[in-house]
Amino acid sequence: MEMRGLMGGLYKISEWIMRLSVTNLLWIVCSIPYIFLLLPTLMSQTTDQFLSGIILSSIIAPFTLFPATSAMFAVARKWVMGEVDAPLLRTFFRNYKESYLQSMIGGIIYVLLFAIMIVDFQVYVKELTTLKLVSYLFIALMVLLAVSLFNFFSMVVHYHMKTFQLLKNSVLLTIGRPFRSMSTAIMCGLVIFISVSSPKLMFLIPFFTGSIVAAIAFWNFYGIYTKLQMQAEKNAAAAAEAEEAAQLANDDAVGIEKLEADKESNIRK
């Protein structure tokens, strides 16, 4: 029997707390090698230690963090599409296995792109000081790349495509829908900022931050997908109507020609 009123509301809230926290913990557990390298990096004392830690964690990220994130997006996809009671463990690990290769390849490419942009940013900030304003362009490009990464994870779990098609379409989708991309960046950035803004809120990171970001990112992606699907259906319906009209016109023309031929035959007789 479904509970209603205050108790029903509290029960639904507790269910969502459980869903978000379990999914977030699964994501962290499957990303342990990456986290194991990242945490000492964040507490490093020198720049060289920090850079070496970032490089090592970036190398391991495509093999751990990226497949785990795809699996988390697969769970978020179920929620956004209304399947809120989908089994968390089964959904997570099935998609972890199915999307591992594509996530790994995409992760390698994204890590390389981020590395190139960060190096270019450092060059313009430290070396080419006269062109320091160009460094802000790289910041904007890195934000767009991060949003396209969210779209990539969403497309990995939603489409059956080749990896490079997914990469290309995720970038095109990000550029082609700037307002959605901006809203994704703002909302996800706000969740991350709140999570790290105070030591009292750091508990959000292991329990909620990742799963909330995944849900927001896929929700925005699904909004784009739904609009594109509706537009495609309208175009298909319009094309079908045009084809039907052309067929009717062709049938009428054939009928008229047949009548004229019959008249001419009767006249000859």
Image (spheres, rainbow, N blue to C red):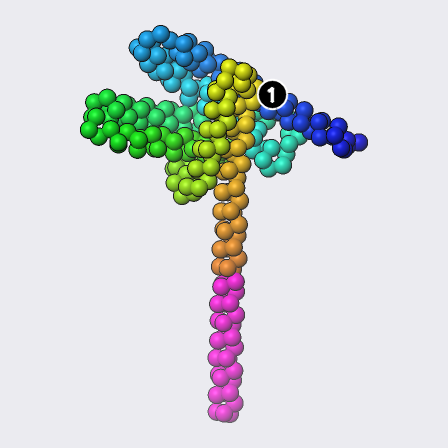
The image position of residue 239, as x and y in percent, is 49, 59
Q: 251 or 11, which lies in front?
A: 11
Q: With 143 as the anchor, is 205 left or right in this view?
A: right
| In this view, 82 is above or below 231 | above
Please name the residue shown 69% across and 29% down the image.
12
The residue furthest top is: 45
The majority secondary structure of the magenta stretch comes to: helix
Residue 91, by quadrant, is top right
User: Mark 1 — residue?
Assistant: 22
Q: Where the N terminus falls, by quadrant?
A: top right
Say if the magenta span includes residue 137. Answer: no
Q: Is residue 80 left or right of residue 169?
A: right
Q: Is residue 200 left or right of residue 179?
A: right
Element at label 1: helix
56 to 10, vertically: above or below: above
Q: Is residue 160 visible?
A: no
Give x and y (percent) for residue 251: 51, 72
**Relative depth, front residue between 161 and 11:** 11
Point 47% across, 37% down: residue: 183
State which quadrant residue 117 falls in: top left
Q: Is residue 267 magenta?
A: yes
Name the kind of residue labelled 1 in the image: Val
Residue 167 coordinates in the image, percent (x, y) = 40, 34
What residue is shown at x 63% (from left), y 34% (from top)?
A: 83
Question: Badge 1 local density, few (<14 within 10 Å), some, or many (20+)?
Answer: some
Looking at the rendering, the stretch of residues picked out in magenta corresponds to: 241-269
Residue 244 x, y percent position in the rendering: 52, 65
Q: Picture quarter containing residue 54?
A: top left
Residue 209 visible to an observer of this rendering: yes
The answer to whether residue 238 is above or below residue 252 is above
For the point 49% across and 55% down, the residue is 235
